[in-house]
Amino acid sequence: MARVHDKVSSIMLSGDELERYARHIVLREVGGPGQAQLQAASVLVIGAGGLGAPSLMYLAAAGIGKLGVVDDDTVSLSNLQRQIIHATPDIGRSKVDSAEDRITALNPHVRFVRHPMRIDADNALALIGGYDMVLDGSDNFSTRYLVSDACYLAKKPLITGALGVFDGSLTTIRAHERNADGELNPTYRCLFPEAPPPGTVPSCQEAGVLGALAGVLGSMMALEAIREIVGFGEGLVGRLLMIDARAMRFETLRYNRDPENPLNGDQPTIVDLSGHE
């Protein structure tokens, strides 16, 4: 996050902001410098749905300086069981418009940027290039692979979450960087080399989802973003956090870079996003 650190020196918190973020500032791990880092940061959230909704709200509450969202959908009644950034009067509205209203009401110090479109191979690099970090709350594998490949090519850290019926998972990808041993970090493709065959993973509409579980995982994505920006604790690079809501159990699986992966492997074959068209 060198780009964030470069902007911190020019950040001055107003009296209103000092009071708003007082509970952050008294934390030794955050303090004034950490809050300034949050204000200097820019984060792009893919999707204003089940995961994106709580992520956006907690990132805005935390004082992220620039917060963008990509979504081409409109609010429907069935969304409201879990997509808490929207409300009943928003049914039929663009999700990015609805999200903007809620974020502006929550924290007017945040610069909110609407991207009312679907992310694809043609616009991904331009969208991602305008931010320091990306949170992917999409609900399909094709978008997750596209976003993870684009983040690698744009050299941006990625926090990606996935939601099942009673389970969820979360990890951080910094495949364009090296670890403390000088080795390249793993990619999303190291964790999931191939997408499941079509039809084997039911959609949310087909299988259902616990609304509160989306809130838990989306909030954890925001928490991971805050930790990455401020720089405290052990991040989730090379670790997959898994949630089992039936047993209320959290487990962490470690994974390594696959030297045969096509993105940052020993003989990479993915050099652009043309394969996603």
Image (cartoon, rainbow, N blue to C red):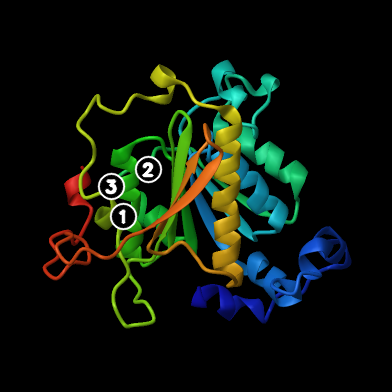
Q: What residue type is labelled 3?
A: Ala
Whether residue 49 is visible here, answered yes or no, is no
Residue 26 occupies quadrant: bottom right
Residue 123: x %, y % from top left: 34, 49
Name above or below for residue 270 compared with residue 74: below
Which residue in the protein does label 3 denote?
121
Q: Which mark is nearer the camera, 3 or 1?
A: 1
As measured in the structure, the alpha-carbon distance from the residue carrying label 3 to the one carrying label 1 is 17 Å
Q: Which amino acid does label 1 sit on?
A: Tyr
From this viewpoint, is residue 11 visible?
A: yes
Residue at coordinates 71% horizontally, 77% vertically from top-left?
33
Of 267 and 154, the residue lying toward us: 267
Say the numbered circle drawn on residue 188.
Answer: 1
Q: Which of marks 2 and 1 is in front?
A: 1
User: Would you call the spot at circle 3 few (<14 residues within 10 Å), some (14-19), or many (20 or more)?
Assistant: some
Q: Where is residue 79 in the image (x, y as percent from the top left)?
A: 56, 23
Q: Mark 2 falls on what kind of element? A: loop
Residue 211 spot, x, y in % from top left: 58, 28
Residue 230 vs residue 239: left or right? right
Label annotation for residue 7: none
Label 1 neighbourhood size at 10 Å, few (<14), some (14-19), many (20+)?
Answer: many
Residue 202 as seen in the image, left or right of residue 222: left
**Could you tell me residue 185's position as x and y percent?**
32, 69
What type is the residue that disc 2 sits on? Ile
